[in-house]
Image (cartoon, grey):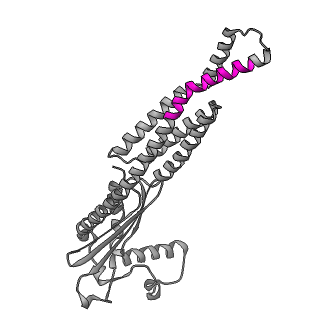
Amino acid sequence: MVKSMTGYGRAESVFNGRKIAVEIKSLNHRYLEVSLRLPGSLAVLEMAIKKKIGERFSRGRIETTIRIDADGDMDSGGRFQLNEPLLENYYALLQQIKERFGLKDDVNLATIAGLRDVFVPTETADNPDDLLPGVEAVLNEAMQSLTAMREREGDILSRDLMFRLDTVRSRLEDIDLRVPIVVNDYRKRLMDRVKELTDGIEIDEARLCQEVAIMAEKSDITEEIVRFKSHIDQMIELLAGSDPAGRKADFLIQEMNREANTTGSKSSDTAIAKNVIEIKSELAKLREQVQNIE
């Protein structure tokens, strides 16, 4: 199933007296990039949360915000608590800097007060490991909501891609039917021109056929058409599959463009040239849409 790279999901729940809320949105990106905004109490869980998100998505910029608040505890509002483990770590590092560089200044209250996350709201002064199960549960729900939205948008994109692939295939069939006509037209034009120039002198039919054969060989686009049709079939199979399709689809469109360019350069027929232009126009739209899928 094709999935869009854009979407939004949100979930919240109460766990161990804490209200946990997760907002997650995804944007187009060539690769997978996870951006997290966490409360200070969950900072140590950043890698674990990113890993969990990476297991669910393969492409796109995933922006996630996690908030933890007290649930109905009005007495805790506005209260702060000392983050002693972090303060001890800060103090040890400051002392190490002081000794290493021979600094005379003392570590005082003003210095400590300016350190980040030394004072934390009472409602966030929890053990991160105790909150992890609740965070994971709400995160899973939010990711499920995001996935559902990406699938809905992906279905719309898939239908548009299939429509454009049908248009490309139709134009390709027109080119395929035109190839033998082009050879016959060239033979007729060559014969008429030779007759005009020779003014009634007998024409060497063998030599004429040889020239037509050389022209037919130089302008033969059978291989390009066969490969092009194969790429379309692969693209349809890819869009109908369950694996992420974005990168492979982008590669297939590049290959289709290559075949279209070769076809256009080999043939001087205006009808074929017109179809090639239409095909390349559709391929440009296909490639633009493919940038939106996972």
Instruction: Name the main secondary structure of what is drawn in magenta.
Output: helix
Q: Can I make out residue 294 in this image?
A: no
Task: Give the residue at the far front of this rendering.
Answer: 200
- The location of residue 263, given as percent across then percent down, is 58, 33
Taking the magenta stretch, the answer to whether it contains residue 100 is no
Q: Is residue 98 left or right of residue 17?
A: right
Q: Is residue 110 left or right of residue 146?
A: right
- The location of residue 7, given as percent across then percent down, is 38, 63
The answer to which image quadrant residue 264 occupies is: top right
Which residues lie in the magenta part? 173-194
Vertically, is 106 above or below 253? below
Name the foreground residue: 183 vs 127. Answer: 183
- The location of residue 26, given as percent across then percent down, is 40, 62
Vertically, is 263 above or below 101? above
The answer to which image quadrant residue 8 occupies is: bottom left
Give me the residue at 20% from left, 79% from top: 17
Task: Give the residue at the far left of this rendering.
Answer: 16
Task: Give the residue at the far bottom of this rendering.
Answer: 75
- The location of residue 211, given as percent across then percent down, is 68, 16
Give me the residue at 46% from left, 88% from top: 110
Name the foreground residue: 3 vs 104. Answer: 3
Q: Is residue 195 left or right of residue 58?
A: right
Report the label total: 0
Give me the residue at 53% from left, 26% from top: 222
Q: Is residue 196 left or right of residue 163?
A: right
Q: Can I make out residue 116 in this image?
A: yes
Name the foreground residue: 165 vs 141. Answer: 165
Name the foreground residue: 222 vs 57. Answer: 222
Taking the magenta stretch, the answer to whether it contains residue 181 is yes
